[in-house]
Amino acid sequence: MFFGDRLDAGRRLAERLEHLRGQHVVVLGLPRGGIPVAAQIAERLGAPLDVIVVRKLGVPYQPELGMGAIGEGGVRVINDSVVRMARVTPEQLAEVEQAERTELERRARRYRGDRPRVGVEGRTVVVVDDGIATGSTARAACRVVRDMGAARVVLAVPVAPRGWTDLLGDVADEFVCVDTPDDFFGIGQFYADFAQTTDEEVIACIERSAAAVAGQSSPHTGGSGAPAGRGRGGEVEVQAGPVRLGGQLTVPGEPLGTVLFAHGSGSSRHSPRNRFVAAALNRAGLSTLLFDLLTEEEERDRANVFDTALLARRLIDATAWLRERPEGRGLPVGYFGASTGAAAALWAAAEPGARIAAIVSRGGRPDMAGPRLPAVSAPTLLIVGGLDDVVLGLNRQAQAQLTCENELVVVPGATHLFEEPGTLEAVAELARGWFTEHLAPAGHVVTADR
C-alpha cells in the first residue's frame, strides 16, 4: 500500500481508530512527521492534539543508527545490544544524550509556545507517528505517556514492518497499523510525498487543532484538556505493617469517600485498567488509592501473589494508614478489587471492625475468599464479562454465599480483561454508580461530572 502524503495516511489511519470515538481521547503526535498524521486523527475523533517530544540517540559515528531515545519527564530508553555492538563508551553516550536533551527542550518550547501540555491523566492516549522502523522512538513516547498517568495507551501508525509489535513489547495497550508489508526497507518508500515536515507546519497543525476545540468543555475535561476533579495527592509510600509500598493517591476537592484498589496477579498500581476506573471515580468526587500489594522482592515468589490472607492484610494495613492521614480521616472507605485482588478485598472487608462501606469486583475471584464470604457486610457488586465463562461461574457460586446486599452484573461481549471496545467504560460507570450510592452522604446527589 502507498500513501499520497502524511495527510492521506492520517485519514486512512483515522478510519481504523473510529472505535475510540467518545472515549475521552487525547492524540499525541511525534514531531515532526507524526503531527500531520495525528492532526487527521484528532479531527476525526474530535479530540485535542498535542506533541509528544522524544529524541533518538544516534551512535556517534553513525547517527542514523539508533542506540536509544529520550523523552520529556526524564524518560530514557537505551538499546544495550546496539551500545555494545557499536562499542559506545559511557562518556560518548552521555555526550549524545546531553545534546539531544537540549534539543528536546528547545523543540518542546517551540512547538507549544506558552500553551501548557494537554493533560493525559486517566485518559485514553493515542500516540501517533508516520511509521515505525526500529521502534525506539515510539517506545520512549509510550513510556512518557504512561508515566504521565494515561489510563490506556494506543500506538497508531500508517505503516510498519511485519512483526512490528514484537519490537515494542508491552509499551502500549493497543497497536493499530494500516499496513505491514513484507518488503520493508524504510518508512519513506511507502509515501509518494515524504518531504520533511517543518517546525512551522507542526506549529500550524497544533494551533488549528487548539482553535477547533477552544472553549469546548465536556464532563471530563476543563479547558486545558486535563481531567476534571484531579485535586490533591500524588505518589505516596504506604506503610503496611513492616513494609512500605508504592502508591498513587488522588484526592479531588471535597471528596465524598475513598476507594482503595486491590490489583490482580501480575499487575500493580500502574494497571491501566484500574487507573481508568479510578479516573472515573475521581471525576465523581471520590478519592482513590492505587498501591502495590507486595514489595518487588515479595513478587519474585509467585506464591505470594496468590496468598489471599497476605494480600488482605496489606489492604487492611493500607486502610488504617490512610484513615490516619488528613486526606482520608473521617471519610467512608470502599474497595475495588480486580481478579485475585477482589478476593483480598472481600477477605479484608470480612474482618471484625473493618467498616468498609462498599465493594466492587471486576473480573474477580471471590471464591478465593472462601469461608470469609458470609461474614462480609459491605454492599458488594460483582462485575463479570459475558464471555468469561469460568470466572462467571465462580462468581455465581460465591454470590450464593454472600449474605450482604449484593448484585452480579454481566457485561455482554466482554472477556476477562474487558479489552473489548466500550466494556471497560461500562465497568467504570457501574463502579461509579455503586460507590457513589453507598459512600455519598444521605441526600447527596452525585452525577457523572459532579
Image (cartoon, helix red, strand yellow):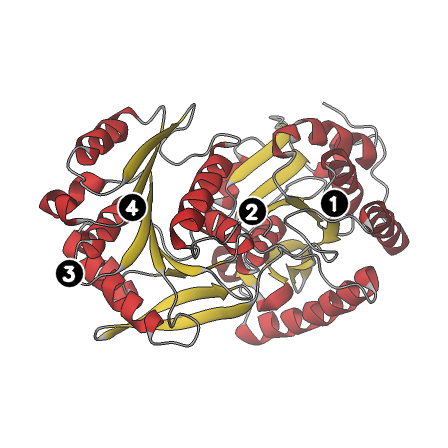
Residue depth check, mark 1 versus mark 4: number of the one nearer the observer: 4
In front of the other: 8 or 290? 290
Q: Are marks 2 and 4 in contact (CB under 8 Å)?
A: no
- Amino acid type of the residue tagged 4 in the rendering: Pro
Q: Is 346 on the left-hand or right-hand side of 442? A: left
Q: Nearer the viewer, mark 1 or mark 2?
A: 2
As drawn, 180 above or below 101: above
Q: What is the number of the mark on residue 34?
A: 1
Q: Secondary structure at mark 2?
A: loop
Residue 447, labelled with which disc? Answer: 2
Neighbourhood count class around disc 4 (C-alpha, 10 Å): few under 14, some 14–19, many 20 upward: many
- Marks 3 and 2, how far apart at CA: 33 Å
Spatial separation of the CA atoms under disc 2 and disc 4: 20 Å
How far from the left and from the top, in percent, is residue 394? 21, 31
The earlier-in-sequence mark between 3 and 4 is: 3
Kind of element beneath mark 4: loop
- Farthest-out residue, left: 371
Q: Percent from the top left, x then y, of residue 87?
A: 53, 64
The residue singled out by tag 4 in the image is 379
Could you give the CA–CA distance between mark 3 and mark 1, rounded to whole angstroms?
56 Å
Kind of residue sitting beneath label 3: Pro
Q: Earlier in the sequence, mark 1 or mark 4?
A: 1
Where is mark 3, residue-wise?
Answer: 352
Q: Dot 3: within a 10 Å radius of its alpha carbon, few (fewer than 14), some, or many (20 or more) residues?
A: few
Report how far apart the C-alphas of labels 1 and 4 lie in the structure. 48 Å
Q: Residues within 10 Å of mark 2 (few under 14, many from 20)?
A: few
Is label 1 in contact with label 2 (beta carbons under 8 Å)? no
